[in-house]
Image (cartoon, rainbow, N blue to C red):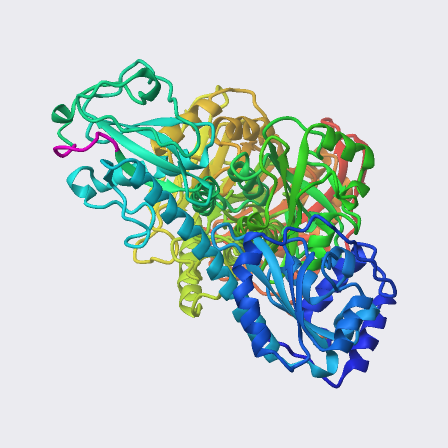
Amino acid sequence: MVQVAFAWDDAESIAAAHERFHEGRAAGRIVRPSILTSWQRCRSLGLVPDRLEVPYLEDLDLESRLCRAAAPVLAKVESALAGTGVSMILTDGKGRVIQRRGGEPELNRRLDAIRLAVGFAFAEQTAGTNGIGTALTDRRPCFVVGAEHFAECLYPLACAGAPIRDPLSGRVEGVLDLTCWRDDADPTMMRVVRDAAHTIEQRLLEQTTAREREFLDAFLRTNHGARLLVHPPAEGGLGELSSADEVLGRADQALLREKAAELISSPHLPMARVELRNGQVAALIRRPVAGPSGETGIAVEARLSGETVPPRPLPPFVSGPPGQAVPVRAPGTPTDASHETAPASGTDSESGTAPAGGTEGWLLLVGELGVGRLALQARQRLELLYDASVRIGTTLDVTRTAEELAEVVVPRFADFVAIDLPEAVLLGEEPAPDASVLRRVAFGGVHDSPLFQAGDTVDFVPSTPQARCLAARQAVLEADLTEAIGWRAVDPPRAEKILGCGIRSLIAAPMRARGTTLGVVSFFRSETRDAFEDDDLYIAEELVGRAGLCIDNARRFTRERTMALALQRSLLPRGLPEHGAVEVAHRYLPAQAGVSGDWYDVIPLSGSRVALAVGDVVGHGMHAAVTMGRLRTAVQNFAALDLPVEDVLSRLDDLVDRLDADQGPAEPGLGGGNGIVGASCLYAVYDPVSMRCTVARAGHPLPALVLPDGTVEFPDVPAGPPLGLGGLPFEPVELDIPDGSRLVLYTDGLIEQRRRDIDVGLRLLRDALARSGRSPEDTCEAVLHALLPGRPSDDVALLVARMHALEPDKVAVWDVGADPANVGPAREAVTSQLARWGLEDLAFTTELMVSELATNAIRYAKEPIQVRLLRDHDTLICEVSDGSSTSPRMRRAANTDEGGRGLFLIAQLATRWGTRYTKSGKVIWAEQKVRGTASPDGDRDGLSVASPTR
């Protein structure tokens, strides 16, 4: 239903809106969207409101089938409107007036003055917004009142127009329009004109049905012995098989009907040969049939044979002149060569399909050449739309979806197709409303052409069909590009080349989804096939609409994936710390289907040790990325407490259990579920002094250990349960790590693939690692190249660490007895060792640390007490261990206190300090930074020592 939301007495507001529109300002909400869209089209065509120039055309067909069908309807409506002052106008499909009836004298004089009379064309391209032209362009009823017209000379009028479609082809054959003075306008005009147009359409259908009935009667009169496999149109409709189940199965019946329709629609194909399911062969023969009015129709006969398909071709079909039916040969009757239509491959008795008597031909289908073509096109269009629904949108990739659209429509619907989208859509963002510069994302064609290719940038100026369709938000048809001018403005030399290669017809359709314009699709046809018609607009809009939804889904997925990936990368370590104990390389590859929660970390610990962690979170999207960040932060905090590896996993397991219990229902847009139970983690701590690595895992794949000679091992680390399940302990394993070995940690996405067994993945990983001398970076590259496809289906995190031992001459250890008198010798030993390392400038602060820590251990702890110095790269580490598990704590001493200042002084002098617990007690450690290098003999070369802060 067309609703007319117009204030009849508000002509001044509409006129003011029209004036604002021509000044380039917003017209305002008072203008209906359909009218505003028409104004935009008119402006893009260069029309001006103060001039109306309509062409006059003499080649009118006043005896057309439209005129014959409309005559009684117009007479009836004219009688009903007598005395109302309404003029009734009938135009053809190009907007040319072929009849004008009724209307009072003053109105008719006005219509004559503006040339709204027989022979003049009032298409929107020449007359602007009006009831005739806009109804033709929009292909739907249209009511235009007063200043809603584009041309000022039409302001005093009101007109209601409705398109008249051919019921079979869908083509707009003309427009029925009611025109009156603006002050006499009434919304009921829309109902009257709509009902009258519908009645004319029914009469057009009756004309076609009557002709088909005449053809069938003519065929039956000429072929008295013909047997029917169709009902006459009055009974069952054209092409409906009658009692055919006794002869053929339903699948064969449908196949024969389809091939018969193709024969009727193909003027140059005299016969067809069809192999049926039961092994029989049907020869379909096309015969001309003349109706009583002189029109020529087509009858298709089917002849059945029990033979299988012979290798020899059928004899050529020879028919008589139009109107002369070829006689059907009875069984056993000799025929001359001029009437033979199929080889005598068998008799009726042999085939067992023909009843006694009559001829061996079965009448299968009767129709007109044009109608048969329309029926065939309708079926092909349905098949095209079905294939589009299946083949477009198989991925969540914007470019691939556009390519799928091109693959579906070429060459079935168009010879060339171009899909142009803004860069923002490719990035997953919302496109700007006025984006005119587009990128050709996909292009398809039957051969090379001068059209812009995929990857090119295209700027559509306002006069092009593409810009007009984007402005009007509906498809635009240019049936003959040789007559169109605006489309050449983008690149005139290229336009001439396009015409030179035979491209003649264009449909430009906007790609829209959920109220957003995503781009434009251009369909082209060459001169070797029929030009695009009005009915093709619906197919183009349907194809582009389906593709638009798929592309919008892909765009939204791209946006979410980009956000999740950016969040995850921000939560992953951007640059791992340099550490003397390990040389590290890492890789993270997001999944094709969406960002998951794979993560890794390298955490420096006290005593020159280092912790390595790799984990995997269940799910995809934003939630997985956020959960990954929470787990990585928790691991860093637990590692800072210097807990054993099994305790780190146990606490992480408890945390996951609590987090999962605190989660509410799944929130839309986060990607995946909100539960995090099932996350996995592998945690390892390497000590370069003892060259041992302690490893434990929670539902995570085994680590790989590459020895210096290239031997690859997968250490047998007990598989604990995934995080959050609880109930079972995590068992650590200590590994002896030779100097220069590589420890490889990874997530399951590296070795598990949909089409590959996990054992195969482990074997490929072993082969990729089995080479000595590789750096961690080279190892990462080799592993990813050997195991991963171009676009992995799951996230992959890879961490490769080459282990280095701390040389014995960089470690010094002294046992200290539980006597305060032993503190002095310990200070002297430390000073001597620092001198051998060339670190005399650190002697004072280090002596003070050793003195305070050793004194505290002697006074408050128990034996064994030990002092250890470690020289690791640019760090000097001082450790004092004892047999007590009581940890000292720093406090601010009062002015009258004799003690309590030791740890405070250490905190001021050290860059880092802390306490870690061991099986036999605790270790208090403090680190100092050393800048520069020292020569092996102790002489400093450009050495500078960090000044302690107080």
Rendered location of residue 19, percent (x, y): 85, 72
> Can you say which quadrant of the picture contains the C terminus?
bottom right
State the extent of the magenta-drawn residues as a range: 354-361
Q: Along the line of sight, which residue is nearer the eye, 176 or 247?
A: 176
Is residue 53 shown left or right of residue 251? right
Q: Compared to 70, does 331 lie above or below? A: above
Q: Quadrant of residue 697?
A: top left
Residue 324 visible? The answer is: yes
Q: Compared to 714, does 522 lie above or below? A: below
Q: Furthest-bottom residue in view? A: 9
Q: Furthest-top residue in view? A: 312
Q: Quadrant of residue 442?
A: top right
Residue 454 visible? The answer is: no
Q: Residue at x 30, y 33 (%)?
A: 301
Q: Residue at x 55, y 50 (%)?
A: 535
Q: Compared to 566, does 131 lie above or below? A: below
Rendered location of residue 308, percent (x, y): 22, 21
Q: Along the line of sight, which residue is nearer the eye, 859 or 272?
A: 272
Rendered location of residue 759, percent (x, y): 34, 31
Q: Compared to 186, does 606 lie above or below? A: above
Q: Along the line of sight, which residue is nearer the eye, 236 or 878?
A: 236
Asked if residue 359 is among those painted magenta in the image, a careful observer would answer yes
Circle count: 0
> Can you say which quadrant of the picture contains the N terminus?
bottom right
Q: What predominant SS class does the magenta segment belong to?
A: loop
Rendered location of residue 270, percent (x, y): 40, 27
Asked if residue 192 is among those painted magenta in the image, a careful observer would answer no
Q: Residue at x 27, y 48 (%)?
A: 231
